[in-house]
Image (cartoon, grey):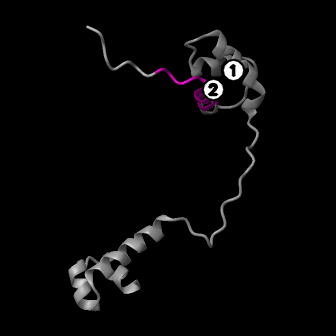
Amino acid sequence: MHQVVILAEQGVSRRALTRALGVSRNTVRALLREHARSRAEPHTALAAAPARAPRASPLDAHLPRIVALLGQYEDITAQRIFEVLREEGFAGGYTAVKKRVRRLRPAPAPANPITPS
C-alpha cells in the first residue's frame, strides 16, 4: 500500500502502477480509495482536545445594558452601543462589542426572492 500511495502522489498513473507492481487495477483502485478514506477519518491514537471553560469577558458586566438597548431600539448599531457603554464606564474595545451584538441580535428574515407583479 505504501508504494502505491507514494507512486500515485508522484503522478504515476494507475495503469503504470499495475504494471510496475504486478497487481490488478482493481487492487490499486481499492488501495487508493482505502488510503483516502483513512486520511479523512480522525486519528484514534490522538486524544481529543479537552473542552475548555469560556473565559470571562469585561463585556459580561454590561450584557444586561446591551440587551436592553437592542430591545429598546430596533435598528441600533454596534457602534452606537459601544459609545453608550463607553459613557457608562466600559473600558474594552469596539470589536468585542460588535461580536457580542452580532451574537445577540436575531438574524434577519430571508428576503422573498419572488416579487409579485
Q: Classify residue 69 by image quadrant.
A: top right
From mark 1 to mark 2, how far is it between C-alphas? Answer: 9 Å
Number of residues whose C-alpha sits closer than 10 Å to that of mark 1, classed few (under 14), some (14–19) or many (20 or more)? many
Q: How many labels sit on residues?
A: 2
Q: Which mark is residue 66?
A: 1
Percent across and percent down for residue 13 are 23, 78
Is 99 situated left or right of 87 in this image?
left
Q: Main secondary structure of the magenta part?
A: helix
Q: Amino acid at mark 1?
A: Ile
Q: Return the residue found at the far top.
A: 117
Which residue is at 58% across, 14% downward? 76
Query: Do the residues bearing badges 1 and 2 touch, measured as CB atoms within 8 Å?
Result: yes
Number of residues whose C-alpha sits closer than 10 Å to that of mark 2, classed few (under 14), some (14–19) or many (20 or more)? few
Percent across and percent down for residue 72 are 65, 10
Helix, strand or loop for disc 2: helix
What range of the chain is rendered magenta?
97-109
Q: Which mark is residue 15?
A: none
Residue 72, above or below 11: above
Looking at marks 1 and 2 on the same chain, the residue that comes earlier in the sequence is marked by 1
Percent across and percent down for residue 17 are 26, 84
Q: Classify residue 34 by image quadrant.
A: bottom left
Q: Look at mark 2 in the image and give the residue it sits on.
A: 104
Q: Toward the viewer: 32 or 10?
A: 32
